[in-house]
Image (cartoon, rainbow, N blue to C red):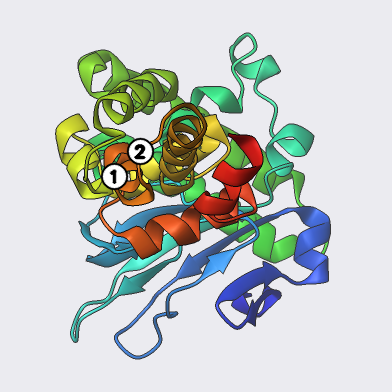
């Protein structure tokens, strides 16, 4: 069944039959020799570890995963499992296209309008494994049974879609959502909204914009991973932190070039650049001309 996922170098995609269904539950048993190397894909994944343990690499960070762990993987950040000799994890992996939830898994009939946005924070924050869900006891056994029944029904009907497989996945997601909501309720302070993090980022950038700092400094100050704050900023601002900082600094430099007689080098240092050649290069990329030319044209 894994053959219905086609590797295109570092990107994995659905084959046509799986793409038509939009939903592909399967059992994955990576080993030290068969684990897929780092990759991205054009679908979402919800892995659920039902046996064993391993490491999971997301971006540049490595996390230990164990029985009962469940986490969402988006279609942006590269990831892969690392399995040591003698380790034998078994993972039920739900792979699905983003539109599949709207097309086939509606919660309206289950819980008065509950929809995917309620578990979207889980997806959004997958880089921070403080947000992963770990289940045990009866909760684990219920979810494991739903997951395996969904895989079994899907396998029995493929390449035709299976309503039974969808039903079990629907139940699986409902149970997952309830458990995750309970996790929020127990630790509300840990789950800061994207907007609040973005506002905190902007405030911190305003304080540092004309000084030398790194994204690592920002992440440590705010208490989040580099990947997390970078993703939040890009989603809210539409550009990377570096692009934003460079643009703000160049805008300040433009004002100083037109409103003062300061030299180019002092201006570069004043707005936050500590290297003149880097300042000249970034300024030209943004303004379309070097600083001296900009001053001649606009002063």
Q: Residue lying furthest top in this view? A: 112
Name the residue at 53% across, 32% down.
237
Vertical comparison of 189 with 16: above or below: above
**Residue at 44% across, 45% down:** 246
Q: Position of residue 5 (x, y in %)?
A: 65, 73
Q: Nearer the viewer, residue 279 or 73?
A: 279
Coordinates of residue 4 in the picture (x, y in percent):
69, 74
Residue labelled with disc 1 = 266
Q: Quadrant of residue 189?
A: top left
As measured in the structure, the alpha-carbon distance from the residue carrying label 1 to the one carrying label 2 is 7 Å
Q: Within the image, what quadrant is residue 190 found in?
A: top left
Q: Which residue is mark 2?
A: 262
Q: Nearer the viewer, residue 67 or 193?
A: 193
Q: Position of residue 104 (x, y in %)?
A: 75, 37
- 27 left or right, relative to 90: right
In-image side of 285 versus 162 (left or right): left
Q: Residue at x 42, y 25 (%)?
A: 194
Circle 2 SS class: loop
Q: How many discs mark residues in the rendered view?
A: 2
Q: Out of 73 and 163, give the one closest to the viewer.
A: 73
Contact flag, marks 1 and 2 (Cβ < 8 Å):
yes
Residue occupying the point 47% across, 26% down: 259
């Amino acid at each position: 069944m894994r053959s219905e996922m086609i590797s295109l170098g570092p990107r994995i995609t659905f084959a046509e039959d799986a793409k038509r269904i939009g939903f592909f539950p399967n059992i994955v048993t990576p080993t030290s020799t068969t684990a897929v190397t780092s990759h991205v894909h054009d679908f979402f994944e919800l892995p659920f570890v039902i046996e064993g343990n391993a490491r999971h690499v997301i971006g540049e960070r490595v996390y230990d995963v164990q029985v009962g762990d469940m986490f969402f993987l988006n279609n942006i950040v590269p990831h892969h499992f690392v399995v040591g000799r003698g380790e034998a994890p078994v993972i039920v992996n739900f792979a699905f296209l983003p539109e599949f939830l709207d097309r086939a898994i509606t919660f309206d009939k289950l819980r008065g309008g509950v929809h995917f946005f309620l578990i979207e924070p889980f997806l959004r924050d997958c880089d921070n494994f403080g947000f992963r869900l770990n289940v045990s006891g009866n909760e684990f056994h219920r979810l494991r049974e739903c997951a395996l029944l969904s895989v079994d029904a899907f396998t029995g009907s493929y390449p035709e879609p299976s309503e039974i497989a969808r039903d079990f996945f629907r139940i699986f997601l409902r149970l997952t959502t309830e458990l995750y909501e309970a996790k929020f309720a127990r630790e509300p302070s840990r789950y800061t909204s994207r907007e609040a993090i973005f506002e905190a980022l902007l405030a911190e950038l305003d304080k540092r914009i004309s000084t030398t700092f790194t994204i690592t400094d920002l992440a440590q100050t705010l208490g989040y991973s580099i990947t997390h704050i970078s993703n939040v900023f890009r989603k809210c601002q539409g550009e990377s932190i570096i692009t934003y900082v460079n643009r703000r600094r160049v805008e300040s430099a433009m004002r100083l070039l037109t409103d003062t007689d300061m030299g180019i080098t002092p201006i570069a240092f004043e707005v936050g650049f500590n290297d003149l050649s880097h300042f000249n290069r970034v300024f030209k990329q943004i303004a379309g001309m070097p600083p001296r030319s900009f001053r001649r044209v606009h002063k």
